[in-house]
Image (cartoon, grey):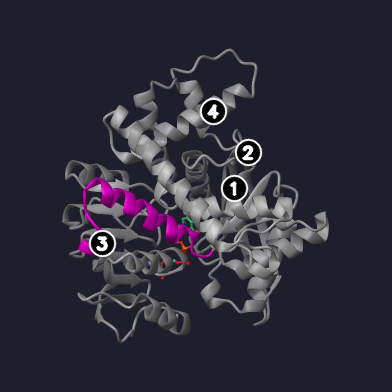
Amino acid sequence: MLSDAHTYFHKAADVLGLSDDVRAILLAPKRTVKVKIVIEGEAGGLQSYEGYRVQHNDARGPMKGGLRFHPDMDEDHASALANLMTWKTAVVDIPYGGAKGGINCDPRSMSKKDLFQVTTRFVQEMKEVIGPLTDIPAPDVNTNAEIMGWIMSEYSRYAGFSPGVVTGKPLELFGSEGRAAATGRGVMDVLGAALKETGTAFADVTVAVQGFGNVGSNAARLIAEQGARIVAVADHTGGVSNDKGLDTVALAAWVAEHGGVKGFKGGAAFDGGEIITWDADVLVPAALENSITAENAPDVKASIIVEGANAPTSPDADAILNTRGVLIVPDILANAGGVTVSYFEWAQNIQHFKWDEERVNAELDKTMAKAYAAVRDVATEFETDLRTGAFILAIRRVAKAALARTYVATELPF
Ligand code: NAD
């Protein structure tokens, strides 16, 4: 997975004529931490997990990135996703670097008490390397506001009241209005910008969404609110489709109760794997990485892909889709709404101040529109795709900041 993340970096670095030594400095993580987490499970006996935090780059500010609880979590995933966070925070121009981490556990098969124990043990092991001015975790796959609240509480036992150590917290624990829906809202924002480019209205498009968790469900609801039809949704339990448009609010309520879209009565069931090649104008992958591969890319019907998930498109698939003229709004732009509102949350926390939802949403919309326009400008300047444009923009910002912090007399080619 890390090599995929590097492929996109090198494509942009080639365009910029970046030297090998600067590339090496920008790619190497600042710090990688791996810890063992042992708990006495409720079912009896010891359970052991591995926890990771990869802190990739802090040239532009404290490092920032989600925590993923998933059996596949390992150093390779954490490194690749930390790398992406550095470029993502630079694309939306917020004062952060990049990090990522998680635990190789499966929350779906754990009791809440075990999950709490695992989370607090993780904080105990990581407390020296995270903090409001060093590295600020946030929710990602299988983690949520409740878990972020536990992290804040545990960290504050050691460091004193520290709401700014983590974002995506519950509102009653200094979370921000608008954070839960922020990534989905950002997806809606950039889809709006992409549709504008092609002279299409939301009301004229059909949308297929893979993943109906935090990102997918909020993106689907907000895109539907703009007038588009969500014709198919798939998650780990299966798929559900409705040509007239799914009721995304009812579907979210069903998922909250049943744990997945399977069995939802407001549409027809299908095999979830078919979602990538669904007959829709827009595809929003919002589940896990590598959903769009060289195998299914030739059969993708959508003309616009908005990457709600991180790294959903393999480099081979990316090349195929670009050749086919599919407009891809890349992850480091498309799903940056979450980290943007995380930044607003952190800013509110360190100022002990609170914004209302209207202000959060307005600032988010503005940030996403500005970032999309900046990426489009760079892509046009270098006659390249939006992903390469986004990487060029980000690399320039990070490399300039990194060099400005040292006395080394290295010249950058931009
Ligand atoms: P989540 O845990 O809330 O939801 C994940 C969704 O993916 C669930 O609906 C799950 O059923 C589905 N899924 C899992 N395996 C699947 C499979 N094999 N096929 C189809 N669907 C499958 O996670 P999330 O926070 O919504 O994150 C989704 C993606 O968005 C991840 O790539 C994450 O890194 C990225 N992301 C999340 C945020 C955020 O703010 N939460 C921000 C930026 C990027």
Point out the frontmost of discs 4 and 1.
1
Q: Mark 1 points at which residue?
A: 64
In the image, 193 versus 102, the foreground residue is 193
Q: How far apart are marks 2 and 4 (CA)?
A: 17 Å
Q: Which amino acid does label 1 sit on?
A: Lys
Magenta range is 180-204
Q: What residue type is labelled 2?
A: Gly
Tell me the quadrant of ligand 1: bottom left
Examine the rendered structure and indicate whether residue 179 appears above or below residue 111. above
Q: Report x, y in % for residue 236.
A: 38, 72
Residue 183 belongs to magenta span: yes
Q: Name the residue under label 2.
A: 61
Task: Sort mark 3 into few (<14), some (14-19) or many (20+) by Cα contacts within 10 Å.
Answer: many
In the image, 347 versus 4, the foreground residue is 347
| Left or right: 234, with 123 as reference point | left
Q: Give the residue at x 61% y 63%.
A: 49
Marks 2/1 in contact by CB < 8 Å: the verdict is yes
Q: What residue type is labelled 3?
A: Ile
Quarter the C terminus occupies: top left
Location of residue 172 by image quarter? bottom right
Q: Give the residue at x 43% y 42%.
A: 370
SS at circle 3: helix
Label for residue 25?
Answer: 4
Q: Name the residue under label 3.
A: 276
**Is disc 3's CB within 8 Å of ligand 1?**
no
Examine the rendered structure and indicate whether residue 165 appears above or below residue 44. above
